[in-house]
Amino acid sequence: MNKAFVKESSHDDEIVALPDMPAGVRNYITPDGYRHLQHEWQRLHEESKAAAMSPAEREQRLHYLQSRMDSAEIVDPGIHEDGGRIFFGAHVQYEDASGNVHEVAIVGLDEIDPARGRISWLSPVAQALLGTEEGDSTTLAGPAGEEELLVLQVRYPYRDS
């Protein structure tokens, strides 16, 4: 863990690590995700005092955001047609072996939000889905063994019409 990416909490003994980019991995991000990083950086940069942040925390966050923007490779999911093959930025509906239907968006590390179905392109589920098409079955290797997933729908909602 890089010290430049450590956020110290209000308790001196508690340190929360900010996500590191895995070595050798590209920092893919959607245009919306990149704009979000820019807006947060701009807001923090313009505020002399960020609410609930010490000056050191603010500077660490600014440094973190800048490094992520510097290394970002913006991938526009809008270049793909609706339906078809799953690429970065796809919104995918799939069914697991138990018959449960899930909806996920495959996004960059700085965009993940599991509660909203936004998963990293590096996650096991995304890795199993990438490259498949609507109607395909794919195998998800997990700690409990292998599980078949059935791709029900693929959408690219960012596409300009």
Image (spheres, rainbow, N blue to C red):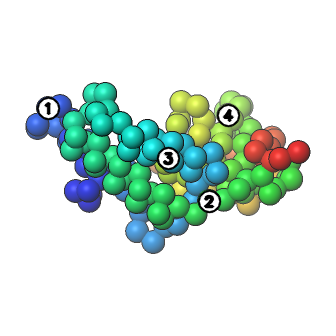
What element does badge 4 sit on? strand
**Outermost bottom residue:** 24
Label 2 to label 3: alpha-carbon separation: 12 Å
Asked if residue 3 can be seen in this view, the reply is yes
N-term-proximal mark, 4 vs 3? 3
The residue identified by callout 3 is 37
Asked if residue 85 can be seen in this view, the reply is no
The residue identified by callout 1 is 11
Label 1 to label 3: alpha-carbon separation: 26 Å
Q: Nearer the viewer, residue 160 or 29?
A: 160
Label drawn at residue 140: none
What amino acid is at disc 4? His
**Mark 2 Cα within 10 Å, few/some/many (few <14, many 20+)?**
some
The spot of residue 141 in percent (x, y) is: 56, 53
Q: Residue at x 43, y 38 (%)?
A: 43
Label drawn at residue 102: 4
Q: Residue at x 51, y 48 (%)?
A: 38
What amino acid is at disc 3? Leu
Image quarter of the C terminus: top right
Label drawn at residue 74: 2
* 18 lies left or right of 111: left
The spot of residue 21 in percent (x, y) is: 42, 60
**Between tags 1 and 4, which lies in front?**
1
**Outermost top residue:** 51
Label 4 to label 3: alpha-carbon separation: 27 Å
What amino acid is at disc 2? Ile
